[in-house]
Image (tube, grey):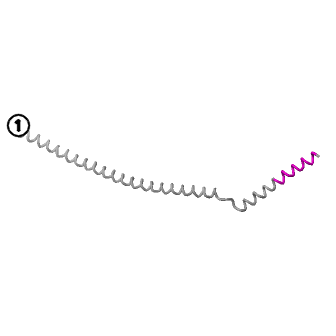
Amino acid sequence: MVECEKCLNEVRLAKLEEDMKKNSETHEKFYNNFETLRTINAVKEERDKSIDKSLATIMTMIGEIKATINEIQNRPMKQVDKIWDKILDKIISFVIMAVIGYIMYQLK
């Protein structure tokens, strides 16, 4: 009987050692996966920081472009534009005077 129990214990011990080895391998895989995830996370964080910097730069550039557009819109007209405005004013005035003159001539 003692001999049989020894055989059973040896089988159990062998199974436990095999399970322990499998568990050790599984734990090592989990640890490696966690390390991989940690590395991937670090890379993503660096990429996010880079994207945030780029976005901040783009927003600054947009602000500068808006300021430049406002400055251009608020500039006084060029001399050529002023001359054309004066010519157009004179033509309109002449047409209005001609119409008024024609109406007055017709009323006599």
* Residue shown at 55% from the left, 57% from the top: 64
Observer-nearest residue: 77 or 51?
77
Residue 88 in percent (x, y) is at 78, 56
Q: Residue furthest top?
A: 1
Residue 27 picture location, percent across and down: 25, 48
Image quadrant holding the N terminus, namely top left
**Name of the residue lying farthest toward the left:** 2
* Most common secondary structure along the magenta stretch: helix
What residue is drawn where x is 78% and y is 58%?
87
The span picked out in magenta is 93-107
Give how far across and how far down residue 10 sits, in percent: 11, 43
Q: Is residue 34 left or right of residue 87?
A: left
The x, y position of residue 68, in whole percent, is: 59, 58
- Amino acid, disc 1: Met
The answer to whether residue 83 is left or right of residue 61 is: right
Residue highlighted by disc 1: 1
Mark 1 surroundings within 10 Å by alpha-carbon count, few (fewer than 14), some (14 through 19), many (20 or more):
few
Q: Secondary structure at mark 1?
A: loop
Q: Which residue is drawn at the image coordinates 92% and 48% (left, top)?
A: 105
Residue at 36% from the left image edge and 51% from the top image edge? 41
Q: Is residue 102 toward the left or the right of residue 37 in the image?
A: right
Seen as rendered, the residue at the extreme bottom is 79
Q: Is 23 positioned to the left or the right of 102 in the image?
A: left
What is the tally of numbered marks visible in this picture?
Answer: 1
Q: Nearer the viewer, residue 10 or 66?
A: 66
| Magenta span contains residue 105 | yes
Whether the magenta-drawn stretch holds residue 71 is answered as no
